[in-house]
Image (cartoon, rainbow, N blue to C red):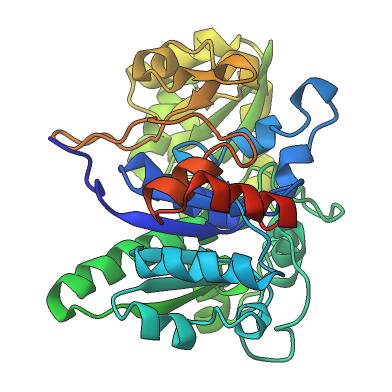
Amino acid sequence: MSPIFNGLRVVDLTKIIVGPLCTMLLGDMGADVIKIEKPGSGDDSRYWTADPRYEGYSPYFMSVNRNKRSLTLDLKQPEGVEILRKLVERADVLVENYRPGTMERMGLDYGSLKKLNPGLIYCSLSGYGSSGPYKDWGSYDVIISAVGGLMSITGEEGGKPVKVGVAVGDIITALYAYGAIVSALYAREKTQEGQKIEVSLLESQIASLINIASDYLNAGRMPQKWGTAHATIVPYQAFPVKDGYIVIGAGSDLLWKKLCKVLNLEELAEDPRFCTNPQRVKNRGVLIKILEEKLLTKTRSEWLEKLNEEGIPAGPINNLDEVFRDPQVAHLNMVQEVAHPEMGKIKLIRNPVTFSETPASIYLPPPLLGEHTEEILEQILGYKPKQIEELRKKGVV
C-alpha cells in the first residue's frame, strides 16, 4: 500500500529543529516536502558542527531533514516570492517559523495565500505566539525551557539551573504541530477548507508540565528539583551499584514489597515508616540511604536480572555507546543506513512508529543545499532551463 501522505505536498519554510522535525515526520509518511532555503547558505543548522568534514550538512541538520527536497529561493526578491506563491497554489500544507510579522511583510501571510489556495493548511511556529508582550522576542529551546518553568524543576535538589540534554521543548512543539496539521487535513476532508494553525514553544512547554503544573494550580504546591527522583513516589530514582547506576521505579505498594524481597530487606515492607507510599515519601532520606547501601553490593547486571524477574521496572543508565549496542535497540532496528550524495553512507534513526499497512520510511537522504532546485522548478512549475539560468544569474535561486 502507498504511504499515508503519498501525493501530499508540503512547503517547508523552517529551520533549526522545530519546523524541520515537524515536516520530516510528514515526509516520513510519504509527503513531498519542499524545503525552501536561502541561496548560498540555507538552514543555519547545516553549519552547527565543530567537525569540518560535515560543513554544510552537519549531523544536527541531517537528524531532522531526511525525506525532503531542497529548493533555494531568495524571498527578498519579487521573483522569489512569486515562485513561492506558485508553489503554494499547488501545495496542501505550508509550515513557517519566521518571526511574527515577517510573512505579512512579504505578502505571504495566511490571509494572502488563502486567496490563492483556499484548501491550504498554514502552520505558523513561533517562540511566544503571534501576539502579546513577548511576541517579538527571539527564542531557542533553552530560553523557552527557562521562561516556561522546565529549568526550574530540572537538576539536583538545591543545584544550579540545568537544561535537559536534548532540545525537548523543540521536540514537543514539533510533535504538537505535526498532530495539528494531521488534524487539520482530516477536517479539510469534511469541509474542503484549509485553516491556519499557530503553535508556540512557550505554550507547548507549559502544556508539557502536565502533572507538575496541575499540582501547582490545584494544590498550590511549588515544585522543586528532585534530580532523578520523583516528588510523590518513593523509591523511584537512580541508585549507584557496584559498577555504575541503575534506575528503579517502585510505583505501587505491591512493587515496593517485591523490591524488599529482591533486596532481602523484607522487614522494610512491614516497617510503619515505609509500608505505604505516603510514609515512604515522608521518610525518603532514611529509606534511600538504606537502599543505596544494599544496592552497592552487586553489579548492574546482577540486580537487573533479579528485578526484572520479579516484574519490577528497572533499567541501566546507558551512555550512547551502550544504547546502540543494547540488544533490544538492535532488535528494533532503530538505526538505518542511507546513501548520501556527499558523505557516502550515513546513519539515521528511523521513525519510531510502526504501521501494519502504511509504513513510515526513509525515502530520501537529507538534501544538499539547492539539490532539487531545477527538478522542482521544471517538474512542478514548468520553468524552462533558460528561465532557471536567468533566475540563477539574478541570485533568485
User: Which image quadrant: the N terminus?
Assistant: top left
Q: Is residue 176 left or right of residue 179?
A: right
Image coords of residue 92 (percent x, y): 33, 64
Residue at the extreme front of the image, as rendered: 386
Quadrant housing residue 101? bottom right
**Is the residue 222 above or below the residue 2 in the image?**
below
Residue at the extreme bottom of the image, as rendered: 132
Q: Residue at position x 44%, y 67% from top? A: 86
Front position in the image: 371 or 169: 371
**Is the residue 241 above or below the residue 6 in the image?**
above
Q: Residue at position x 25%, y 50% from top? A: 7
Front position in the image: 220 or 100: 100
Image coords of residue 39 (percent x, y): 71, 50
Quadrant housing residue 340? top right
Q: Residue at position x 41%, y 80% from top? A: 196
Front position in the image: 348 or 263: 348
Q: Is residue 277 left or right of residue 213?
A: left
**Is the residue 175 above or below the residue 301 in the image?**
below
Image coords of residue 46 (percent x, y): 72, 40
The answer to whether any part of residue 283 appears in the image is: no
The answer to whether any part of residue 73 appears in the image is: yes
Front position in the image: 314 or 120: 120
Q: How many numbered circles are shown? A: 0
